[in-house]
Amino acid sequence: MPATTKKLPWQPFHRNDMLPPKPPPPATTGVLGWLRRNLFSNWWNTLLTLLGLWFIWVVASSLIEFALIKAVWTGEDRNACLPKDGVEVGACWAYVNAKFNQFMDGFYPADQEWRYLTVYAVGIALLVPLLIPKVPWKGLNALLLFGAYPVLAYLLLYGAPSLGLPIVETTQWGGLLLTLVIASVGIVISLPLGIVFALGRRSQLPVIRFLSIAFIEFWRGVPLITVLFMSSVMLPLFLPEDVTLDKVVRPLVGVALFAAAYMAEVVRGGLQAIPKGQYEAAQALGLTYWQMMGLIILPQALKLVIPGIVNTFIGLFKDTSLVSIIGLFDLLGIVQTSLADAKWSTPTTAPTAYLFLALVYFFFCYGMSRYSLFMERHLHTGHKR
Amino acid sequence: MSTTTLRMQETSAEHAARTRRFWLVMALGALSFLLFFLAASSFYYKSPTGMFADLAGWLAAIGAALVNFQGGFLVWLGRLVTAVVNIAPMFSLIFFIGMGYRLWRWVQEEHPRPASANPLFDRHFRGIFSELVVFTALAAFIWWIVGNTVDNLHRLGKPPGFDFLGATAGFGINQVLFLEYAETSSYGKAILVGLINTIVLSLAGIVLATVLGFIIGIMRLSSNWVIARIAEAYVEFFRNVPLLLQIFIWYNAVLKPLPGPRQSLVVADAVFINNRGVYSPKPIFTDAWWIVVAAFVIGIVASWFIARWAHRRQMQTGQPFPVLRTALLLIFGLPLLAYGLVSLFAGPPVSFDYPELRGFNYQGGMRIIPEFIAMLMALSIYTAAFIAEIVRAGIQAVPHGQTEAALALGLTRGQKMRLVVVPQALRVIIPPLTSQYLNLTKNSSLAVAIAYPDLVAVGGIVLNQSGRELEIIALWMLIYLSLSLATSAFMNWYNAKMKLVER
Amino acid sequence: MSTTSNNTSAIASAASTDELAVQMIDVNKWYGEFHVLRDINLEVFRGERIVICGPSGSGKSTLIRCINRLEEHQAGRIIVNGTELTEDVKKIEEIRREVGMVFQHFNLFPHLTVLENCTLAPIWVRRMPKKEAEEIAMHFLEKVHIPEQAHKYPGQLSGGQQQRVAIARSLCMQPQIMLFDEPTSALDPEMIKEVLEVMVELAETGMTMLVVTHEMGFARQVADRVIFMDQGQIVEMNTPEEFFTNPQSERTKLFLSQILH
């Protein structure tokens, strides 16, 4: 043992028996600790908490009172929803109930409703397994959904006299049906188109790059409503005299091109995020440009930008409501039109209708954004940059 | 070995290849010119002779348009644009000439290794060739469309042109700012009024959305759980409901059910709120008002100088100076002082015209139409949800280590935010924020749904009255497009300037 | 429940507070249910160099981060420079001014040049004229051997250079105590040396230093005391000679056998 001659102001120390862990002071853990940390850590925080709770109470209670407690659920006409004995009533669900069919499909013949319901059913049956990562046969599934399903949907929705399905003109389509048709066609067209323009924008060939940039910046630079005006009044002018375009197809063209430009920018973001090494590795393997893009780069890039793609889908879905301005009866359009019906004219009709609309749109958009969050976590495989 | 020696040693085989390449390019060039003239003449001008006649005519038209100033600026601009558009196919000549130059360079170019004997397998040649094909096809398609349109318009008896902008509008607009407008004014004037309304609405919306968005975004980062959840609910709800629906809600479900003028909500006996809008006292300024304005301007300018001086002094001596308090005092105190002095010596420099209930409506005062309020509320609340997310992401993008380092150096929490977190967060926030501003501006076009007289709504009326779809839509797009392009040019400049220097 | 029989707090009274840079008395801290610091008692004398080592998750970083209140302790007392750490924001800022810290990941401000990184705190916290702050900054940048990089941005420097800037940045505040939180763990081997050299030079100036590190060579060369921590407690504390040649506790022996191979 070496003798220490230096005088230390402290004493050497060691322990062989370790201290056992002790539970934390009760005020810092459990529900109480959580409350204290997150809600009542000081007077300012406490004040905020109380204000917040009060705000939530005010909003939630008035909403519940309007939508549930004071609501009118049944009735034949406006008399059911008028103030009774001077007391205002809440939401007039009787009105939504009476108009429900119209809200769902516009003026689709009642005896043909099974047709679009079948389209919905087949669509869900094909879409759900595609969205759940664990279900196998993705390739076949996608082929059916994007190859066979559109044909089926067209035949059923529009009709084919040779198959015994009377034609239902698109002018009779409306409500949620029309909204879904425009949104899904827009989504299906805009994604591949967006990818093409994203690749074009990153191309080595100056002319192709310039044309892609011009396309993308043009559509991103103008408001959708002007695009819709253009497609509804100018598309007929663009075509030779004897060609006519269906009234529903016109805005579809506009919506799809518009969404494609936004999609292209999202995809470009993904392409830029792929490390250069991936391109070099693919080229070193002797892949051609299209093989490299299709097999190596795009799968990774698209995976990276799923949130952006879904956000574009959500935007497109919300934007379909704009077709009501150019005179189509989509969900928003038909509800807005039904508000003019004198039979149901009451003070609460409009708020009820808008609450109903808000719930429907929120259901679809929020659902999509939750799904994208889920996929983002599921696919989180790499490339931390 | 340098390239010059390579050139010296060009073998006869290589020389033959170069010659082959040269003739191939010549043939290709001739073919593409032929294609170009064929496409232009058949799809656009309908016949070769028509093309040359048209060209001469439109060149003359450009000359005429340049010197003819009658009918106001918009009409003049319109004439010029029409004339220029009509020789559009000629502009694609520039492209062909450019391509020819590139091919020529390709022939002249010194390749480090011999080019493929068959030019069709040469990467460079393939690139140029595919571009030529794409462009020719596209140009033909566009000429086809333009040709159809011109045909159709002539058949409908309304040849394209912007001269109609000079015609009398004949309709009233319920919100006219900064301009004098009457039903007898021209279409062009009406559209200008619409443009100003768009700009006013957008600016107001941008200010409100920014304030609201920053508040919500910071709330989402709050350590207080309740506050963070409220902000999250706000963002999720308003982002996931279409803006158009929100506009309808504000207009039809909130503002319309307000009581009529006779039962107006009254604020401070001066502001009256009813279903026809908000009526507030209208200030009427006397000549002495400029003194107050000048005091305000002086306050701002002085504050700016004081801020600079204070910064310099702190850098020199280390002494801080309460800049914010001084500036506030100057900016608000000076005008107040001026107001007081002017009132004392020359009487109040401003008087108010109070709105009065006459008959069924209020007269006088200042009226803010309900359409404006509905648009403003819907636009700013909707956009604020997106801005909140941008702000949150921006602040979260600053690593926690930065905060720790700043605190460990002894900076106060305010200094930490101002000197370390905010400058870094802003780099992340500004670009998407700008694009949200643009979105808001473009979304203000939804005003047409509730007839707020913005650019699109007024344009729509003109379109219906004059039947000039093409011109009106082109005008809309041109205006919005130039706004967008100017903004993105600014954004690129800002990004380049603010990019963090890295290896 | 306390093990005062061999607890260092017994000697706390022996030293006068003037000589003490840091005093920790029965400090306890939990992350949720996890007991991360257990009954820590430690006195750091002025001018002392202490190296703290231990396996990852032993609480050594948390310990020094409690000293400038980047982490909050939940029980016990911490007195730095004669000022006790409480909720009082002003006192916390006062202490942070006198305590410099160097982080594992440098945490330089990427939007400021090296020089601006160094002058930021002296200008805004010490209220120093810019020119003086810059002179001091250049002085310390010379001390860490990179005056020529003063006008570059942190992103343009190598890891070792960045860490040396971080040291200079802390020194510009002319602190009385320096904390080092694994300053070389994020560096490539060839850069560790240049940073350690700077730290050794700093130690020779008589700075009070608390260093969390696994660089045992550094500990041998400059430390007055080596502390070994495990499971949130101080397991062994001794002079470097004794600590390395004659470890007392089983855990220390095991740790040393693992780390010295």
Image (tube, rainbow, N blue to C red):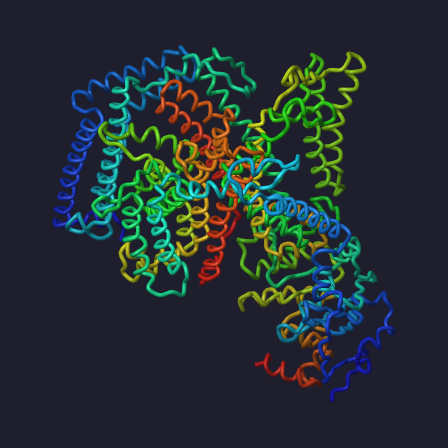
Q: Where residue A102 appears, x then y in whole percent?
A: 42, 40
Residue beneath the point at 36% across and 12% down = B67
Q: Residue furthest bottom?
A: A1
**Is residue C88 in view from this perspective?**
yes
- Please state which of residues B57 and A352 is positioned toward the viewer in this rendering: A352
Q: Where residue B108 appears, x then y in whole percent?
A: 22, 42
- What count of labels does the image hold? 0
Q: Is residue A214 left or right of residue B325?
A: left
Q: Where residue A21 appears, x then y in whole percent?
A: 71, 76
Residue beneath the point at 37% across and 11% down = B68
Residue beneath the point at 23% across and 37% down = B137
User: Relative to residue A12, is residue B470 depicted above or below?
Assistant: above
User: Relative to residue C13, is residue B495 depicted above or below?
Assistant: above
**Is residue C150 in view from this perspective?**
no
- Please state which of residues A231 and B107 is positioned toward the viewer in this rendering: A231
Q: Is residue A283 left or right of residue B172?
A: left
Give the quarter of the image for residue C131: top right
- Please state which of residues A46 and A218 is positioned toward the viewer in this rendering: A46
Give the quarter of the image for residue C193: bottom right
User: Relative to residue A252, is residue A340 depicted above or below?
Assistant: above
Q: Where residue C215 appears, x then y in whole percent?
A: 62, 73
